[in-house]
């Protein structure tokens, strides 16, 4: 864990069925027994959701797409978390959605909208 990203190193290469350029669309469980158990216990919704879930969550939080580096004997994953870039993207998205109304909001009002957008609700103590 670093201030601006999370780095994950996995020994072993990708399965032959999963090419790096199509990692999001090709699903394969390294250990189907563990995958099945996680599904049965409700920890995983469905097989193959992991990579797609990472992309969706990163996008939802206005972060860059994951970066996969595949070597012959390992896979590295970088998940960037630049708070400045994240905030700028969030405010740009809100500005596009609200148009001129966004520009007329005070700082506190923008903060309330921002929190409500992320959490679907806002409490006074959060402001």
Image: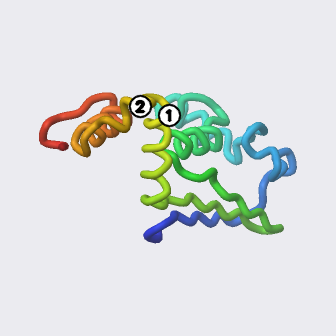
- Name the spot of residue 85 as percent of width and height, x first: 49, 57
Identified at 62% across, 35% down, the residue is 49
> In terms of image quadrants, where is residue 122?
top left
Where does the image place residue 16, in percent across and percent down from the top left?
A: 86, 50
Q: Position of residue 27 (x, y in %)?
A: 74, 38
Instruction: Report the colour scheme.
Output: rainbow
- The residue nearer to you, when weighing 34 against 103, is 103
Q: Position of residue 28 (x, y in %)?
A: 74, 41
**Image height check: is 43 above or below 2?**
above
Does 25 sit left or right of 57 as displayed?
right
Quadrant housing residue 127: top left
Per the rendering, the mark at residue 96 is 1
Task: Check disc 2 and report the residue beneath it.
Answer: 100
Q: Residue at x 22, y 42 (%)?
A: 108
**Residue found 33% across the figure and 34% down from its top:** 119
- Say what secondary structure mark 1 lies in: helix
């Amino acid at each position: 864990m670093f201030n601006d990203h999370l780095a994950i190193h996995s020994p072993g290469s990708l399965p032959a069925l999963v090419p790096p350029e199509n990692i999001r669309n090709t699903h394969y469980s390294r250990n189907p027994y563990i995958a099945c158990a996680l599904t049965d216990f409700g920890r995983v919704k469905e097989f193959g959701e992991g990579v797609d879930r990472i992309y969706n969550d990163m996008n939802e939080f206005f972060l860059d797409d994951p970066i996969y580096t595949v070597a012959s004997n390992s896979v590295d994953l970088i998940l960037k978390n630049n708070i400045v870039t994240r905030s700028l993207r969030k405010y740009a998205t809100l500005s596009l959605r609200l148009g001129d109304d966004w520009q007329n909001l005070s700082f506190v009002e923008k903060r309330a909208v921002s929190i409500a957008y992320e959490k679907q609700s806002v409490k006074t103590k959060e402001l």
